[in-house]
Image (cartoon, rainbow, N blue to C red):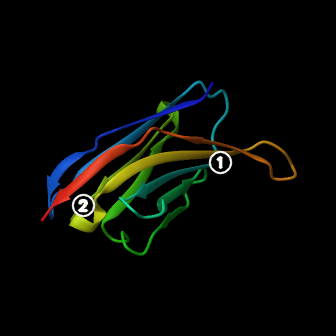
Amino acid sequence: QVQLVESGGGLVQGGGSLKLSCVASGSRFAFDAMYWYRQAPGKERELVAMISNGGRENYAESVKGRFTISRDIARHSWYLQMNRLKPEDTAVYYCHARRVISVEGETDRYWGQGTQVTVSS
């Protein structure tokens, strides 16, 4: 059974930094893509950043230049370095992983339980 566990959230002042970590366990095979999402109160869950197994990165416009996603395949982990944090970055952050399981493109998807990030003004 695949489990994802996030850590690293907390309270930080505006302009500060945090680094989130996500560790996967129970997976025999590598993921095709690893993600960070976030959900603020009263808002839809939104994609923050993605990194593919090949290392291709994508970011939401709102975090470009401030956040960096990285991965450590050997440790079954990926990370989100968040710099110059703003109050509007306050949300629960979730890690997410996708694995393609068929030539037709079917996928297995996994979610962590979320970690709270609160940025004070």
Front one among 104 and 112: 112
Indicate the amino acid at tag 1.
Answer: Asp
Q: What element carries label 1?
A: loop
Rendered position, 118 above or below 84: above
Q: Which residue is rendered at x = 28% and y = 44% of the image? A: 9
Q: Residue furthest front?
A: 42
Q: Residue 32 carries which label?
A: 1
Tell me which numbered mark, 1 or 2, is placed earlier along the sequence. 1
Give the x, y percent position of residue 118: 23, 53
Q: Which residue is labeled 2 in the image? A: 83
Q: Point out residue 106 in the picture as x, y percentages from the top left corner.
A: 80, 49
Between the C-alphas of marks 1 and 2, the distance is: 26 Å
Kind of residue sitting beneath label 2: Asn
Q: What element carries label 2?
A: loop
All told, the count of numbered labels is 2
Query: Would residue 38 be seen by someone viewing this image from the given angle?
Result: yes
- Image quadrant where one finds the C terminus: bottom left
| Residue 93 image position (x, y, % from top left) | 39, 50
Q: In which quarter of the image is residue 68?
A: bottom left
Q: Does the image show residue 86?
A: no
Quadrant assignment, res 31: top right
Q: Mark 1 packing: few (<14 Cα in 10 Å), some, or many (20+)? A: some
| Residue drawn where x is 35% and y is 59% of the image | 41
The label on residue 51 is none
Q: In percent of the image, x 18 and y 48: which residue is there?
A: 11
Q: Quadrant of residue 119?
A: bottom left
The residue drawn where x is 46% and y is 53% is: 36
Q: Where is residue 1 in the image (x, y as percent from the top left)?
A: 63, 24
